[in-house]
């Protein structure tokens, strides 16, 4: 595997899965920990408007400001019924170990039926042309993402610039989740890179169910990378504490930290991070990311035509 060259890394990494509760946020945290571990500069967007859990943990200033009633450009605006106050804000990551890798950015990106959200989403491609951009997508935005990529021609723009777009598709191994994965692969074909993330922490039979599903054969034929999200061995109480304290996984695992986690809990989180990072590394996505062009070779520039939803039968 070739050495990672951070200065050449670019592209759009979308953590998806469409179905809620499959572990997208947890995997996104692992992906960010990978970038921090490998010292890869990145730009991150949590596209969950109502509950940006990952954003609140990894970029707390930016996403706390949003939930407190500030605009996408980082200006504080008064709530209805109060005096108007407008204040310029400059976002900077709070954590010292993160601030040199995270590009300061006040912009919030969401995917909705609102046309203006679509225009703002175009900034993702503009940034991904020069930077590594990671987006945590909420559930049930498949149709909106399809309209953005296909209907608005964003995928064609990316292909012209040989800009890699990758779906990290997180599945819990349920029939619904695997059908959605099959749907995504059928629609986009080789127009979008896919990495299958099997969350074994949610189901002991996730991998077994995956192997028995028709999507498994398609993935084997297309040589699509598969990674496993291991189980995080914590009690429900400890998981709630991890979420409410809003600690990065790396911070929670730090044995020198004075947080409320016991030595055993810290060791379990540390072990989980190590395993997750190894799995992400095995995908090969970041080893030659600067050379990827949506699975197209340099001698084959013909546009890949994704299918429409009408052509898919689940």
Image (tube, rainbow, N blue to C red):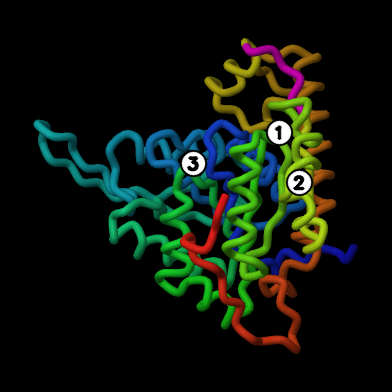
* Rendered position, 12 above or below 181: below
Q: SS for tag 2?
A: helix
Residue ID at (75%, 57%): 218
Residue 27 disc label: none
Residue ID at (58%, 17%): 240
Residue ID at (75%, 60%): 286
How crowded pointer 2 is (Cα within 10 Å; few <14, some 14-19, many 20+) is rated as: few
Dot 2 and dot 1 residues touching (CB under 8 Å)? yes
- Closest to the camera, between mark 2 and mark 3, is 3
Identify the mark nearer the N-term, 2 or 3: 2
Residue 139 disc label: 3
Query: Mark 1 sits on what residue?
Result: 250
Identify the mark nearer the N-term, 2 or 1: 2
Dot 3 and dot 1 residues touching (CB under 8 Å)? no
Q: Main secondary structure of the magenta part?
A: loop
Identify the mark nearer the N-term, 3 or 1: 3
Residue ID at (72%, 17%): 234
Image quadrant where residue 163 sits: bottom right
Query: Mark 2 sits on what residue?
Result: 37
Q: Relative to 240, is 296 on the left or the right?
A: right
What's the distance in space between the residues labelled 2 and 1, CA to CA?
Answer: 9 Å
Q: SS for tag 3?
A: loop
Q: Which residues are magenta?
A: 231-236
* Residue 232 visible from this viewpoint: yes
Question: In the orientation shown, which residue stands out farthest toward the right?
Answer: 1
The residue nearer to you, when weighing 246 against 216, is 216
Q: Relative to 28, is 109 on the left or the right?
A: left
- Quadrant of the frame with the N terminus: bottom right
How crowded pointer 3 is (Cα within 10 Å; few <14, some 14-19, many 20+) is rated as: some
């Amino acid at each position: 595997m070739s050495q990672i060259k951070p200065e050449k890394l670019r592209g759009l990494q979308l953590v998806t899965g469409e179905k809620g509760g499959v572990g997208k946020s947890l995997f996104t945290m692992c992906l960010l920990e990978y970038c921090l571990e490998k010292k890869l500069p990145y730009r991150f967007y949590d596209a969950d408007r109502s509950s940006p859990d990952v954003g609140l943990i990894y970029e707390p200033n930016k996403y706390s400001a949003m939930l407190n009633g500030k605009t996408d450009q980082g200006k504080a605006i008064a709530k209805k019924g109060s005096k108007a106050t407008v204040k310029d804000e400059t976002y900077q990551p709070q954590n010292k170990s993160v601030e040199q890798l995270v590009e300061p950015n006040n912009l919030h990106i969401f995917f909705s039926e609102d046309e203006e959200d679509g225009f703002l989403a175009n900034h993702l491609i503009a940034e991904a042309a020069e930077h590594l951009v990671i987006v945590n997508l909420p559930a049930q935005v498949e149709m909106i993402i399809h309209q953005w990529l296909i209907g608005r021609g964003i995928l064609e723009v990316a292909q012209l610039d040989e800009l890699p777009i990758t779906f990290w598709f997180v599945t819990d191994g349920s029939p619904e989740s695997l059908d959605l994965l099959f749907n995504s692969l059928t629609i986009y074909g080789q127009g979008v890179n896919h990495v299958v993330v099997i969350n074994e922490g949610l189901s002991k039979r996730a991998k077994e169910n995956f192997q028995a599903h028709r999507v498994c054969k398609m993935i084997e034929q297309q040589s699509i990378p598969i990674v496993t999200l291991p189980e995080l061995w914590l009690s429900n109480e400890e998981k709630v504490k991890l979420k409410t304290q809003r600690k990065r996984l790396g911070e929670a695992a730090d044995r020198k930290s004075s947080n409320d986690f016991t030595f055993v809990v810290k060791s379990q989180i540390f072990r989980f991070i190590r395993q997750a990072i190894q799995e992400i590394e095995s995908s090969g996505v970041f080893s030659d990311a600067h050379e990827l062009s949506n699975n197209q070779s340099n001698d084959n520039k013909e546009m890949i035509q994704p299918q429409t939803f009408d052509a898919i039968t689940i």
